Image (spheres, rainbow, N blue to C red):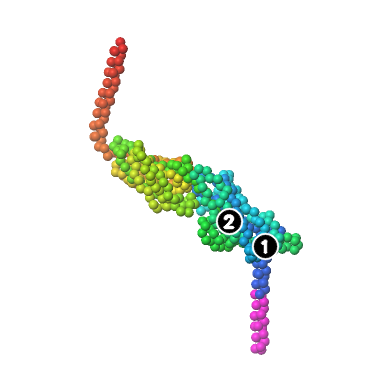
Amino acid sequence: MRNESKRRIQSRMIAGMLAMLLCLATSVTALAGTGGIAANPQKAVLTKNLRYADGAGLSTPTAGFTFTFTPVSLDGSSAAADLAAMPVIAPAALSFSGGDTAALVGGMQQVSKNVDVLSGITWSRTGVYEYTVTENATGFTPGSGESMIYSQAQFTLYVVIAYDSVTGTYFPEQTYTEKTQDDAGGTATGKGDPDDTSDPTYNFIFTNIYTRQGGSTPGSDALTITKTTTGTGADPTKQFTYTLTADDSGTGVLAAGTYTGTYTPAGGTPTPVSLTADGVTPLSFTLASGDMLVIDGVLAGTTFEVEETGATAYIPSYTGIVGNSVSISDTGTVAANLDTGTQTIGAISNEVNYTNTYDNSLIPTGVLNNIVPVIVLIAAAVLGFIAFAASSRRKGSC
């Protein structure tokens, strides 16, 4: 009886193990069956992203980008004969123009295009083919103040070629990429499936950044800040204190830029100034009525903020044009600070014009009333003199 029970237990264990092996075999078969077939071979889809600053009046530039495929090995061998047996993958090309529609991605405008780099390739034998893929730093002719930051990314592309006995053709059964260098030229790791761009592991992407200097004349007068004082008691020589903080990270640059400019007093000689666009280092300066601060060469898409320190007896205000022809204005309260808030350097003109109005309510009413009769008497005397002069000329002519 006891032996019979043992046999039943052993039979159940064997049956369970067989079921597990069957399931495992099914899984392995399913995994082995994935990939391309002769009628629908695996692809290697390369994506090109072209990015530029948002809200700065920029548009997609005309450019054509190409990519080079360098043979590395065939079945792990880099012998000359094996490399010669590898098919040439012609430089892939993708073109962009002003008519391309961009989408906001990660705070920047982006146009994306892709191409199957294995399309039209003829394979002559089975094996594992390995290529290095890089972008050529050509294809864009910069205009005044324009530049292109080319991707320095590097990938290793692996193509597994199989043979179809029915059609008698060789075809890509499997493809995958390994990223070895990122867009900035740093070391990178990670493998991905270049056949399906929706796959979470897909990473066969090169990203370029297009930049342009702000201002109506790129590279000149990218940001202008002017000063005016007005009101009965206003002092045109009074210096008002300001800070200017800028951040050009939204333009896609890898490190904060340092931009030069000039401070020009009314009727005076310009002196140089320097602005670091890291978002934290302020440029402090003063302006009196008629003075001007100009910063040159700032990239469109750079954000900035100007703040005036409150001055006793003056009401601050400003007007301006920034970004993509956006009008800004505000009026503060007497003796209080007034800032522009975060604004964006645009591809057209960027100006902030501060005006400080003397608070006439500080002048006693009696003083103003006492002045009025004097002004009236002076005006009457002037008019009388003019009338007398005109009468004398008439008598003399007779």
Decide if residue 52 is on the left or right side of residue 247. Answer: right
Please report the bounds of the magenta region as a residue range.
1-20
Q: Quadrant of the C terminus?
A: top left
Q: Is residue 397 above or below residue 190?
A: above
Q: Nearer the viewer, residue 341 or 166?
A: 166
Q: Is residue 121 above or below residue 214?
A: below
- Image quarter of residue 290: top left
Mark 2 against mark 1, which lies toward the viewer?
1
Give the amino acid at mark 1. Ala
Q: Residues within 10 Å of mark 2 (few under 14, many from 20)?
A: many
Q: Is residue 395 above or below residue 375?
A: above
Look at 75% across and 60% down and name the residue there: 167
Look at 45% across and 45% down and name the residue there: 297
- Image quarter of residue 177: bottom right
Q: Secondary structure at mark 2?
A: strand
Q: Quadrant of the N terminus?
A: bottom right
Q: Nearer the viewer, residue 175 or 337?
A: 175
Q: Is residue 149 visible?
A: yes
Q: Position of residue 368 (x, y in %)?
A: 26, 33
* Residue under pointer 2: 134
Q: Are marks 2 and 1 in contact (CB under 8 Å)?
A: no
